[in-house]
Image: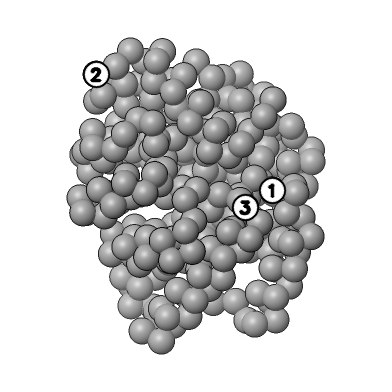
Amino acid sequence: MKMIDSHIHLDHYHDEEIQLMLADSVNIDYLLSVSFDLESCKRNLQLAKTFQKIKPAFGYHPEQSLPTTEYLEKLLNWIDEHQNEMVAIGEVGLPYYLRSEQKVSCEQYSQYTSLLETFIQLAKVLKKPIVLHAVYDDAPVVCDLLEKYSVKKAHFHWFKGDKKTITRMIAHGYYISITPDVLYDEEIQQLVHIYPLAQMMVETDGPWPFKGPFLGKMTHPNMMMESICMIAKIKNLPKEKVFKIILQNTKGFYQIVE
């Protein structure tokens, strides 16, 4: 019944919360902590050096202002220097939510797309998986870029999108990860029903909060226990089998060798 949180922002938690979380996570093998910007990358690297269970990914989250040329160069140089200490490029992608709030112009969206292309190229050169923030109508744009550079090891975290895009992602072998809202969100439940278990992981995206049975609770990797049980119910499979497959999927995708 072991699990790996394939997407969490540990650097957004307080030190005391991280220590308590790790002490209270006997079923958690590893936590893949994704980065928001350069400072976040540095923080995640330090956490990984402090706690054996933490595996860092380095990148620049798209739901924020575009980096300056100088900042991006500094970030890319830092990632290159620390490439052997990360498991993936991430979190990177496109600013769907900023765009839906009309905070991103067409010209800026083109710049975000170019930024993502830079990270996809980097993942290709460094031979690392890439962790993607790409939902709804942004997802086909991201698929185009992945196909352009023949990048296969792509992880679409907390994915939401249409059936055509889902079919395309499945065909290319891209992975998704399921959040605790699978317990109450019909859209996520339908995604679990459609997507192959062999291309599925679980995540919390903590400290992002959840509703339903998790309302008012600090997001904790232990919540994934209930996520996996729900996945097993939807797939009509024994939960022990689903736990094992999802664990193997995540270790294989991120090349975690014990």
Q: Residue at x 60, y 76 (%)?
A: 67
Q: Is residue 143 left or right of residue 44?
A: left
Q: Nearer the viewer, residue 64 or 49?
A: 49
Asked whether the beta carbons under mark 3 and mark 2 sit within 8 Å of each other, the answer is no
Is 146 above or below relative to 188?
A: below
Q: Nearer the viewer, residue 236 or 49?
A: 236
Total count of labels: 3
Q: Quadrant of residue 54?
A: top right
Q: Quadrant of the C terminus?
A: top right
Q: Indicate which disc residue 127 carries.
A: 3
Q: How far apart are the alpha carbons under marks 2 and 1?
A: 36 Å
Q: Give the structural element (helix, strand or loop) at label 2.
A: loop
Q: Residue at x 28, y 52 (%)?
A: 168
N-terminal label among 3 and 2: 3
Q: Nearer the viewer, residue 47 or 135?
A: 135
* Residue type of the residue flagged with mark 1: Met
The residue singled out by tag 2 in the image is 236
* Residue type of the residue flagged with mark 3: Lys
Q: Please indicate, yes or no, whether residue 206 appears anywhere in the rendered image.
A: no
Callout 1: few (<14), some (14-19), or many (20+) C-alpha neighbours within 10 Å? many
From the top left corner, tell me how far across and down residue 28 is, in percent. Answer: 58, 25
Q: How far apart are the alpha carbons under marks 3 and 1?
A: 11 Å
Q: Nearer the viewer, residue 71 or 180?
A: 71
Q: Which mark is nearer the camera, 3 or 1?
A: 3
- Most extreme residue toward the bottom is 107
Rendering colour mode? one colour
N-terminal label among 2 and 1: 1
The residue singled out by tag 1 in the image is 86
Q: Give the structural element (helix, strand or loop) at label 1.
A: loop
